[in-house]
Amino acid sequence: MSGFLISTPFRTGKGWSWLDASIGMYLALPLIVFLAAWLRPLYSIPTLIALVYFASNLFSRQHFMQERVPASICFGLALLALGWVALGGTGHWFYANVDWVFRDALLRDLVLTPWPPQYIGGDGESLIMRAPIAYFLPAALVGHFAGLAAAHVILYVWTALGFFLVLISVCQLFEVKGQKLIAVALVLGFGGLDLLGYLAINRQLPVVGEHIEWWAGFAQYSSNSTLLYWVPNHALPAWLGTVLVLRHWRESELARLAPLLGACIPLWSPLAALGLVPIILMGINWSRDVKVLFAPKRFVPAAILALLCIRYLTMGSRTIPGEWIFENPQNVAALFNLYVLLCFLEFGILALLILRLRAGSGLVLMAVALLLVMPAYKFGYGNDLVMRASIPALLVLALSTVRPLTEPGHLGWRIILAVVLGIGAVGAMQEPARSLVSPRWPAMDISLTDASREYSGIAAPVTYVSKLDSRVLRALLREPVLVRSSLTAGGRYPPGEDENGR
């Protein structure tokens, strides 16, 4: 039984490789920029020294294993990453979803304003940018010197690089060529049975390109295409962190790596980091590696950096709405039925098929348990806890289908599994379809607060800005600089999209 709980269906490594180092540097670079540019020099210098010291202790005297990937595969995956990311709207080469109005505004303010940016709220109060900004910082840094247009190009390249690392690292979890191809296809097109849920609620098929994943009304489990096209800032660190855990499952390297993930990922996406924690804890060999995990030379500097980022990100978090979904007794019955249908269609059928094919493990059961409990609490205007914290568990579930699809036996059940994944992929393809049928629109030169007033009717978006209410942070951070306002011209929604995301 204990072997079942800790087993993994993925190929694990012995020691570090160039791929591990590349993912680590990708996740850590924004934190380096943040420490250097947002903190006063008196504090940024020692924190940077702590980060370098931590990294040197992580990789020092470690043997890097050989992990060769054919150049043709690297080239093909690089082209795929560049094309798929462009289709998602990053860089505005194709149509971009409405959320990019706010991401463009965030990037614009980071490029045109010395850090940290400051805003004036609706009642005249001073607010500071408080958001998971790691994804934007490398491009914004280049934009400081090369301009806003260059920043958008760099953001596109930076996103494609992250997605390339996801694709190649997922491939390396499997040995057979067919399994590698399926794994890549799942990263592109994995999704729940949203199409069936939409049909059940709306009694009609969606139009091409319609966003169908809010069919349950109170929550959604996002497909991989939705995650990359709408929230790459959350998806990339969640995917990369999850793959690193799977690559070093139950190995000492994971215990050494865990503090780095804890220090870097919260600045990317605190909710994705929250969803990754249980998987990391399960992946560590506690009987052997507890001293490795808590080694002071690695754990202490990482903990200091993590606490700094978490304190920054939790400023004013009480203003973000949150509630238990079953608080209202009048809605319990109807909501519970929707909850059951959501869980059944989004991951329940898939999990049952995996277990029926005897491909399940404790890791799959943990993913299912996490996905079951997440909808119970609504956090944020769009139930962000469910959408972001679920990313690691959904990736585990998706990749756990690869071996059952390719291994011999149980032909009938394998066909059913392929059909379920195929229906999920049809729903997920609504996202690239929208990019192909909707007109491209250029990035808007608009500040974050102006975008909030223009597109949401809210003076200051509480998920992005906050009062600088911490004495500690007030002492650590540089003096905030007021963002220059710039109102947009045009209609309320980007071309080709209305308030329903159509």
Image (cartoon, rainbow, N blue to C red):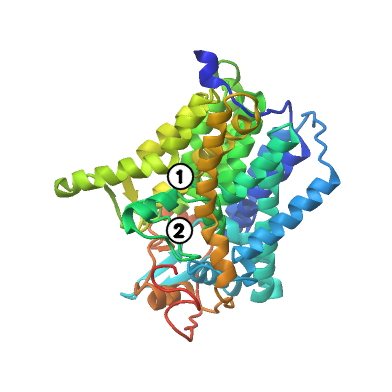
Up the image or down, 47 lies above or below 149; here it is above
Asked whether residue 290 is in view, the answer is: yes
**Res 87 quadrant in image:** bottom right
Q: Residue at x 71, y 28 (%)?
A: 13
Pick the residue in front: 125 or 131.
Answer: 131
Q: Residue at x 31, y 74 (%)?
A: 123
Q: Are marks 2 and 1 in contact (CB under 8 Å)?
A: no
Nearer to us of marks 2 and 1 is: 1
User: Mark on residue 474?
Assistant: 2
Q: Residue at x 56, y 27 (%)?
A: 283
Label 2 SS: helix
The local crowd at label 2, few if under 14, some if 14 to 19, many if 20 or more residues have their Cα within 10 Å, is: few
User: Residue 144's x, y, as percent?
Assistant: 66, 71
Between the residue at mark 2 and the residue at mark 1, the CA separation in whole angstroms equals: 29 Å
Up the image or down, 121 lies above or below 234; here it is below
Q: Which residue is mark 1?
A: 389
Pick the residue in front: 281 or 494.
Answer: 494
The local crowd at label 1, few if under 14, some if 14 to 19, many if 20 or more residues have their Cα within 10 Å, is: many
**Residue that lies at the very extreme toward the front in this rendered image:** 412
In the rendered picture of this protein, how many numbered marks are placed on residues?
2
User: Residue 163's x, y, as percent?
Assistant: 66, 52
Asked whether residue 24 is in view, the answer is: no
**Residue that lies at the very extreme toward the top in this rendered image:** 1
User: Residue 327's x, y, as percent?
Assistant: 20, 46
Amino acid under disc 2: Arg
Q: Quadrant of the C terminus?
A: bottom left
Q: Is residue 138 left or right of residue 191?
A: right
Pick the residue in front: 415 or 381.
Answer: 415
Label 1 SS: helix
**Res 115 quadrant in image:** bottom right
Pick the residue in front: 309 or 447.
Answer: 447
Amino acid under disc 1: Ala
